[in-house]
Amino acid sequence: MTTTLAPPVPIGKAAVGALGILALSTGALESVVSPTIPLLERELDMSQSEGALLSIVLLITGALITPLAGKFGDRYGGKKVLIRLMAVVSLGGTVSALAPNLPVLLVGQVLQGAMIGALPLSFIVVRKHLPAGESKVAIGVVSGLFVGGSMVGMLSAGPVAEQLSRHWMFALPTIAVVGSTLLVNRLMPADPPGRSDGAGIDWPGLLLLSGMLVTLMLVLALAPEAGSAPLVLVALVVLLAVLVTGWVRVERRAAAPMIDLNMLARPAIWKACVLTFVICLGTTMAVYLVPQLLDERGDGYGFRASATEIGFYLLPGAIAATLAGPLGGLGDRRFGSRAVVNTGVVMMAVGLLAVAAVHTEVWHLVVGKVLIALANGLCVTAMMTSTATAVDPNDTGIATSLILVSRVLGSAVGGQLGGALLTAGTPSGSEVAAESAYVTGFLIAGVVVLTALFVTRTMSKGVKA
């Protein structure tokens, strides 16, 4: 039943700005591990398999927390749940910053994974306090700053770890998260809770989803070495199929499912999820391959760039990613989500295919990365804004959390695929991947992204659930 409450208090630019700063901070904290895995492996005496585990544990916990946070936010109020969630994230960042060894760092990353649930909670707050048109722009700003924060974290992590220490690369964004959380708590009025059906938490669904995600990540991690342990990989694939089947059955029968399959079956929602997965797969392959190519020391390719130089080369892309959020929100409001997504898909495919064809100068990679980053921001923001404003306000959190889970899965698959291609393209006894491995990676990413056009052509100009 839905309780009748007083209308929510309208919010101004300062409150939206506070949410944006929080998104920027959490995005930076989320992304510091990925570019510093080699450094962490050396300092913590980690094997490559342990490094792979560290790189995916935050994604796994984030994918689990996100639908739970969205459901709680819809039920109890976005701000209330957001502040508590960020307290957990701040604790995780502190643990990671002080971690003396891998087990403690893993605990910190598990706690930090809660940060991915912050976005649907921010959307709940914005949706309840602003009219539809203004909320699209505000959601675009928050989404864009989260993407921009991720780029800032990737750019700054290496130089901070090299010049200060690995502890500070976690500590600095954690301090920013704490400060921005306090700012949100002060400037953002409380939003009224939504309907409550009296049902409890779908723990069986949550456990099965956990098993699915862990198994999927293991399959992706072991796939490049399938030849050495084929039976293990086959067993994991079978286990994944069993878990998926069991999870679907449990969710269909649950009174309050963790992920509402009926909502996922709506054309607007599943199309947005498919598009987000495909686009993030292509983006993440570029995010992985471009820095590797800048660092590469091949004969006639690669630029032998340092961590600081790579950060400088990627800076224009970070700026483009930050601007893409507000532009995507404005474009969705004026032209509709289909036009924005089509533009982004074409732009990203052009960037990926151009880099595959021409990568003999640094500026080739810089321009390609700008196009890819801008396109990613436009597409993901359009999916977020159209989904958030197409469903009932009480379903905003769970609907947008489905998009974020798709983003996490697409990013995980894209990163693993890029790594597998470089591993397969590295001759035995060499540390230099063949140029053809990079070309193949960019080509595959470009072609995969273009398949999104088959989905966007069936969308209405403004997505409606």
Image (cartoon, grey):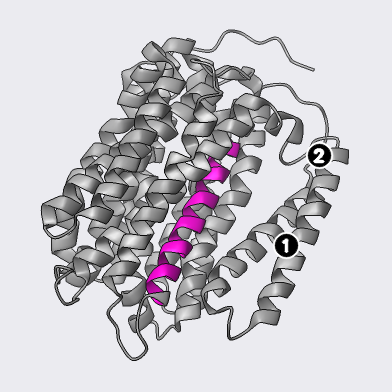
Q: Is residue 456 left or right of residue 168?
A: right
Mark 1 belongs to which amino acid? Leu
Q: What stretch is highlighted in magenta?
A: 401-423
Task: Count every numbered label the image shows and give the total.
Answer: 2
Q: Position of residue 103 (x, y in %)?
A: 52, 76
Label 1 sits on a secondary structure element that is helix
Q: In this view, does 423 lie to the left or right of 404?
A: left
Q: Main secondary structure of the magenta part?
A: helix
| Residue depicted at 17% across the width and 69% down the height | 301
Q: Residue furthest bottom?
A: 429
- The residue where tag 2 is placed is 200
Q: Nearer the viewer, residue 95 or 372?
A: 372
- The residue where tag 1 is placed is 240
Mark 2 belongs to which amino acid? Gly
| Residue depicted at 18% across the width and 57% down the height | 359
Q: In this view, does 243 lie to the left or right of 397?
A: right
| Residue depicted at 23% across the width and 57% down the height | 156
